Image: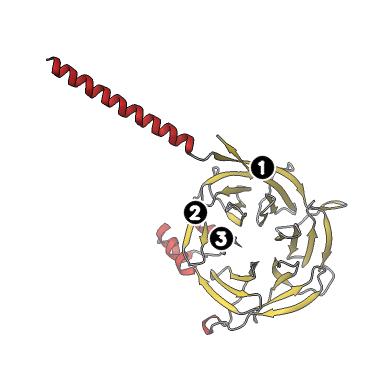
């Protein structure tokens, strides 16, 4: 009997030891885990001149990372405005000039301005200097036969590469700074497969148009597709990932539009319907959102296009209702 009791006591002590060891392990693991990042957002200002806020309707945005200048392009007025780091206009051109009608703008490393012509059957890019003077035309060369007649309505430039996007066909071509064709990315068929998975009956009626497009620091491409309630990441090897879910709550997608990314891999997505900008980390985990519809300075009205100052944590948001461009400061504070 004593031996049996002794065995029970030994088993109990052993079990307690294991429980204590497990608790110690998880406690140590918890302390070893990196601190979570809490999103801190503060409204800074509206892009302005000495008369006050400059009103614009869904302007296209470009950012010169070297000189910390933001560019707005008003398609309706065919006008380019340049703002300094404090958000004050320093130069404007185009409204009364013979500047070619364009659909998008991109900024080069040396301050060159690239415009994508509206009627662009030859697939070319107009180059302007920092004062808006015409500096040349770059024709895209050696386009494969199956892409003859390709047209683009979106333009990005990063690390010496041009990205030309046809939003309706979901095709993206790349070219070097000399205009030599490099690669085609055709994601249209893959988006149709995703649409069919969501709703086979609805697939045939969908217009899978890309709403916005940007390029990250590793050459990865991001874009939004409103009818799929999703944002996508396409890496340089062609791997396609998606994130987002339809809904009206925080982090959910209503009518997604602009997309941008910063130097730390964070992704910013504008939602026209919900009037917010959502922030996701590089793993597509929702970090928070800001804006919200209203008339206060820090509110947003139908946000559309985004640009990011990758090193200073500023986000530029172009809005509807002729409201203009709002600038926010983003911080990710570590919390225990």
Number of residues whose C-alpha sits closer than 10 Å to that of mark 1, classed few (under 14), some (14–19) or many (20 or more): some
Label 1 and label 3: CA atoms lie apart by 23 Å
Residue at horizontal 44 percent and vertical 63 percent from the top: 203
Q: Is residue 35 left or right of residue 155?
A: left
Label 3 and label 2: CA atoms lie apart by 11 Å
* Residues at circles 1 and 2 in contact by the CB criterion of under 8 Å: no
* Residue 318 vs residue 112, the one in the foreground: 112
Q: Which residue is mark 2?
A: 243
- The image shows residue 253, relative to residue 143, as above or below, that is above
Label 1 sits on a secondary structure element that is strand
Q: Which residue is mark 1?
A: 41
* Residues at circles 1 and 3 in contact by the CB criterion of under 8 Å: no
Give the mark, 3 or 2, whose residue is nearer the N terminus. Answer: 3
Residue at horizontal 14 percent and vertical 18 percent from the top: 3
- The image shows residue 75, relative to residue 31, as above or below, that is below
Residue at horizontal 52 percent and vertical 60 percent from the top: 233
* Residues at circles 3 and 2 in contact by the CB criterion of under 8 Å: no
Q: Quadrant of the C terminus?
A: top right
Give the mark, 1 or 3, whose residue is nearer the N terminus. Answer: 1
Give the mark, 1 or 2, whose residue is nearer the N terminus. Answer: 1
Label 2 sits on a secondary structure element that is strand
Q: Is residue 319 left or right of residue 261?
A: right
* Residue 3 vs residue 12, the one in the foreground: 3
Number of residues whose C-alpha sits closer than 10 Å to that of mark 2, classed few (under 14), some (14–19) or many (20 or more): some
- Nearest to the eye among marks 1 and 2: give it: 1
Label 3 sits on a secondary structure element that is strand
Q: Which residue is mark 3?
A: 222
Q: Position of residue 287 (x, y in %)?
A: 56, 44
Q: Which residue lies most toward the left here?
A: 1
């Amino acid at each position: 009997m004593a031996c049996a009791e002794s065995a029970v006591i030994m088993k109990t002590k052993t079990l307690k030891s294991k429980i204590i060891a497990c608790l110690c392990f998880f406690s140590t693991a918890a302390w070893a885990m990196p601190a979570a990042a809490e999103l801190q957002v503060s409204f800074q200002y509206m892009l302005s001149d000495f008369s006050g806020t400059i009103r614009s309707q869904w302007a296209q945005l470009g950012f010169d990372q070297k000189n910390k200048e933001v560019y707005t392009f008003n398609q309706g007025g065919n006008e380019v405005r340049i703002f300094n780091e404090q958000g004050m206009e320093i130069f404007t051109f185009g409204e009364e000039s013979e500047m070619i009608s364009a659909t998008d703008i991109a900024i080069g490393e040396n301050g060159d301005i690239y415009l994508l012509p509206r009627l662009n059957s030859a697939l070319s890019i107009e180059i302007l200097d920092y004062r808006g003077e015409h500096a040349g035309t770059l024709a895209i060369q050696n386009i494969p036969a199956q892409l003859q007649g390709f047209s683009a309505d979106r333009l990005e430039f990063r690390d010496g590469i041009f990205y030309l996007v046809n939003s309706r066909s979901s095709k993206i071509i790349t070219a070097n700074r000399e205009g030599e064709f490099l690669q085609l990315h055709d994601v249209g068929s893959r988006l149709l497969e995703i649409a069919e998975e969501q709703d086979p009956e609805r697939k045939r009626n969908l217009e899978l148009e890309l709403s916005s497009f940007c390029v990250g620091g590793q050459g990865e491409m991001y874009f939004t597709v409103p009818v799929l309630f999703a944002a996508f990441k396409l890496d340089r090897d062609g791997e396609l990932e998606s994130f987002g879910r339809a809904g009206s709550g925080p982090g959910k997608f209503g009518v997604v539009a602009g997309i941008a990314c910063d130097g730390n891999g964070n992704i910013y997505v504008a939602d026209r319907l919900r009037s917010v900008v959502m922030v996701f980390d590089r793993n597509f985990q929702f970090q928070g959102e800001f804006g919200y519809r209203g008339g206060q300075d820090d509110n947003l009205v139908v946000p559309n296009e985004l640009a990011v100052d990758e090193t200073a944590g500023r986000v530029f948001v172009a809005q509807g209702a002729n409201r203009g461009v709002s600038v926010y400061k983003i911080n990710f504070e570590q919390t225990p």
